[in-house]
Image: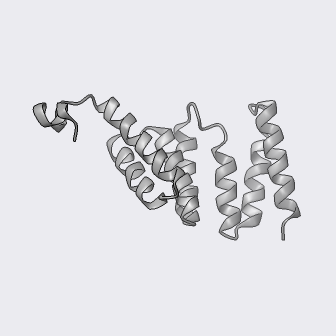
Amino acid sequence: MGLFERIFGAGAADPAEAADDDMNQAIRLYRKGSFQEALAIADRLIAGGPGIALSWRFRGECLVSLQRYEEAVASFDRAGELGGPGTDDVFLWSSLALHNSGKREEAKARLRDALASPALTPELRARTESALKTLEGSP
């Protein structure tokens, strides 16, 4: 607990700054392989701001790392529904989670659907085509 919080109380800090601190801590935990702890922070961030797509995306990434694929797909789908910066490629993550859960045809269909969109950037289109090619070649 920082000096400011000890003097003025935990509620006195700026909520946005606290969320940034939480996200930074979650990313540090994720990078060192502490996926369950990072997920707990992601869940706390979502509880405080359920309309923030990047929190849902991060939650999905944690869940993929924990091999909880069904939950990961739901988190990525929620991030995609909310949209905004950092969500243009969540369908790739969702496809990976579907593939890893054994839903290979559904994973490929998700990529094909994305390729049908004229909104894909050339870079994202190339990544999607590469992902589909990889999945089509896997057993």
Tell which of 19 and 133 is nearer to you: 19
What's the residue at 23%, 30% (across, down)?
13
Across and down, in percent, residue 59 comes to: 49, 51
Q: Is residue 49 above or below residue 60?
A: above
Examine the image and state in which quarter residue 80 appears.
top right
Count of marks, rendered view: 0
Task: Tell me the residue at 12%/31% (across/down).
Answer: 8
Residue 21 position in % (x across, y down): 37, 37
Question: Horizontal placement of 72 versus 36: left or right?
Answer: right
User: Furthest residue to the left?
Assistant: 7
Q: Where residue 22 sits: x, y (%)?
A: 37, 42
Instruction: Specify the color scheme.
Output: one colour
Residue 14 occupies which quadrant of the picture? top left
Residue at x 48% of width, y 45% of height: 27
Front-lying residue, 27 or 121: 27
Residue 50 appears in view? no
User: Is 125 situated left or right of 80 in this image?
Assistant: right
In the rendered structure, the answer to whether residue 86 lies left or right of residue 59 reads: right
Asked whether residue 59 appears in the rendered view, the answer is yes
Q: Position of residue 131 (x, y in %)?
A: 80, 51
Q: Residue at x 70, y 67 (%)?
A: 103
The C terminus lies in quadrant? bottom right
Quadrant in the picture for the N terminus? top left
